[in-house]
Image (cartoon, rainbow, N blue to C red):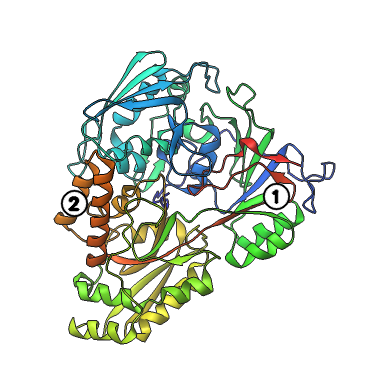
């Protein structure tokens, strides 16, 4: 899951004020406070950005989308492998470029219209034919990460589209054709960005009418007040001034119906405030539990669920930010200067471990034999001296007002790494910025940044989703152009044989480690917590927790 890069200020319409959860007459939930037995109030760190997942890249938007919408292919519960979603099965043709999906029958959208093959094609045609501002990477980030370009690219920088066509063969059979073999298919179709929407609702609320500018994106009513999927919950209200969003049970759901009647997502940006709200019973769960709070909350009887580590925290090095950073010796010295083990031991949750590459060891393609940069102060000083960079001064950006699964306390992490860099003679200029939009805009565009923190939580279980997302093309975040590396990615992505592709991923990880575009720091198992009486939720490495099974005991 990428950090949100959108610059928009979203105008929300048709909003209703929510009744306060935890009212005096409600039943006890067993957590020490009050809560309605059929209502879960979940504390989130930030407001969702948009309710149409086609346009979303931030975790809070996608958390809501996963309850309302469904995809053709979904992750297995608690895992990363593709399993049936709205499609019961899928098979490729002999060339590996056309996939046939057999769809579930008897499924209805929340507006009562039928889900069928024509609805699937209406969605893919909508994405593929995006025009104008919808071709901005800030509006359709995941389409561009997975599919590349569009039917008619309006920018020379956009590549040919991986997607080619959608054909409804009958009501429950659809063919998706692609321009080439790709490792991304079908796994990438698990992304909420490829969730299937009601074509009737898309048309009624003019869902593709994105206006404004790249700096001030304005979304249509569909994306702020009428998201219409097939999921076990349906949208009710979004009260942005009061920082609450409500979804309710879809009583017409084709599968096992939600046990809860209502789920309220309440924004509480401060981590300690979320913890206190849980203890008082004002909320019955929250994400991104601080590492130091895991054991105390368990000791108090709360249901703390630890996700498998499926992420990477990294220190990015922008090679355009300072001429010295274009020298591989300097980047390798920065790798050697960072004491990853000390950082993991002191600032990250139990189970975290130092990273040697930008891929977790649970993903095929991980290479334990990549070039490793052991913590070595004197060795780093020597490399800097040999490169003529002994008096290096770097601008180090770090975010404020944010907690991420891979980055529990950015300021603490910055202070430790800045001290490591100073110990090898690098002078650091600290540049703290508010996470959204200031920090994200500053570090993913232009050349004003030298060093910065970011990370990635995987979207599906393929190596390309990690290393390809970061390094398969020129990106302002990293500031380098490496055609040889880009060609290796293209070759790996188009390799149909899984075993051969895995070996190519291993070679790519070795090449990336040698090139040292940044410092892979750690993989962390983030925790999510629920009230003492709340069960039925399985932790997901993809943060794909489903509230459909949640129940109060």
What residue is shown with label 1?
283
**Quadrant that contains the C terminus:** top right
Q: Toward which corner of the image does residue 245 lie, by quadrant? A: top right
Q: Toward which corner of the image does residue 39 lie, by quadrant? A: top right
| Residue 186, x across and y down, in percent | 35, 34
Circles 1 and 2: CB atoms closer than 8 Å = no
How many marks can you see?
A: 2
Above or below for 291 versus 131: below
| Residue 194, x across and y down, in percent | 40, 34
SS of the residue under disc 2:
helix
Q: Residues within 10 Å of mark 1 (few under 14, many from 20)?
A: many
Structural distance between the alpha carbons of marks 1 and 2: 48 Å
Q: Nearer the viewer, residue 77 or 414?
A: 77
Q: Earlier in the sequence, mark 1 or mark 2?
A: 1
Residue farthest along the left direction in this orientation: 484
Judged left or right of residue 267, residue 378 is left
| Residue 250, x across and y down, in percent | 62, 26
Q: Nearer the viewer, residue 203 or 70?
A: 70
Residue farthest along the top direction in this orientation: 170
Residue farthest along the front direction in this orientation: 499
Above or below for 68 versus 113: below
What residue is shown with label 2?
488
The label number, if any, that marks residue 467 in the structure image: none
Q: Residue at x 22, y 49 (%)?
A: 489
Task: Tell which tag, 1 or 2, sits nearer the viewer.
Answer: 2
* Visible residue check, residue 221: no
């Amino acid at each position: 899951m990428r950090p949100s890069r959108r610059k928009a200020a979203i105008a929300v319409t048709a909003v209703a004020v929510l009744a306060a959860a935890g009212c005096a007459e409600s039943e006890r939930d067993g957590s020490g406070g009050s809560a309605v037995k059929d209502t879960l109030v979940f504390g989130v760190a930030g407001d969702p950005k948009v309710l149409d997942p086609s346009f979303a890249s931030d975790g809070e938007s996608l958390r809501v989308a996963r309850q309302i919408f469904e995809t053709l292919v979904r992750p297995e519960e608690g895992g990363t492998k593709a399993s049936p979603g709205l499609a019961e099965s899928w098979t490729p043709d002999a060339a590996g470029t056309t996939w046939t999906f057999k769809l579930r029958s008897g499924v209805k959208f929340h507006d009562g219209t039928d889900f069928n093959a024509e609805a699937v094609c209406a969605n893919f045609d909508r994405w593929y034919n995006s025009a104008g501002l919808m071709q901005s990477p800030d509006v359709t980030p995941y389409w561009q990460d997975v599919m590349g370009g569009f039917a008619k690219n309006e920018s020379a920088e956009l590549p040919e589209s991986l997607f080619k066509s959608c054909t409804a063969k009958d009501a429950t059979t659809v063919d998706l054709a692609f321009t080439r073999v790709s490792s991304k298919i079908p796994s990438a179709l698990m992304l909420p960005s490829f969730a299937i929407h009601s074509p009737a609702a898309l048309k009624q609320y003019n869902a593709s009418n994105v206006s404004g500018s790249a700096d001030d994106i304005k979304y249509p009513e569909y994306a702020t007040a009428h998201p219409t999927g097939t999921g076990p919950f349906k949208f009710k209200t979004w009260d942005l001034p009061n920082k609450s969003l409500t979804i309710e049970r879809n009583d017409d759901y084709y599968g096992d119906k939600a046990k809860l009647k209502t789920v309220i997502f309440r924004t509480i940006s401060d981590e300690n405030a979320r913890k206190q709200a849980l203890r008082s019973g004002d909320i019955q769960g929250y994400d991104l539990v601080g590492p130091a709070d895991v054991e105390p909350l368990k000791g108090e009887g709360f249901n703390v669920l630890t996700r498998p580590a499926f992420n990477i925290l990294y220190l990015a090095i922008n090679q355009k930010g300072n001429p010295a950073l274009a020298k591989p010796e300097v980047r390798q010295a920065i790798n050697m200067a960072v004491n990853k083990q000390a950082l993991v031991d002191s600032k990250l949750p139990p189970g975290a471990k130092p990273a040697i590459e930008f891929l977790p060891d649970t993903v095929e393609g991980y290479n334990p034999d990549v070039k490793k940069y052991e913590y070595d102060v004197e060795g780093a000083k020597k490399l800097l001296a040999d490169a003529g960079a002994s008096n290096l001064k770097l601008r180090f950006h770090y975010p404020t007002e944010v907690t991420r699964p891979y980055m529990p306390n950015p300021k603490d992490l910055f202070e430790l790494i800045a001290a490591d860099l100073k110990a090898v003679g690098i002078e650091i200029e600290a540049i703290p910025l508010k996470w959204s939009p200031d920090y994200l805009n500053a570090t993913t565009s232009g050349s004003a940044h030298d060093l910065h923190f970011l990370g990635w939580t995987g979207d599906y279980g393929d190596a390309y989703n990690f290393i390809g997302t970061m390094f398969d093309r020129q990106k302002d975040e990293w500031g380098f152009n490496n055609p040889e590396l880009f060609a290796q990615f293209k070759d790996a992505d188009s390799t149909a044989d899984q075993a051969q592709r895995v070996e190519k991923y291993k070679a790519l990880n070795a090449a990336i480690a040698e090139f040292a575009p940044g410092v892979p720091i750690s993989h962390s198992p983030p925790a999510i917590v629920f009230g003492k009486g709340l069960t039925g939720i399985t932790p997901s490495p993809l943060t794909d927790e489903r509230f459909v099974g949640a129940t109060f005991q």
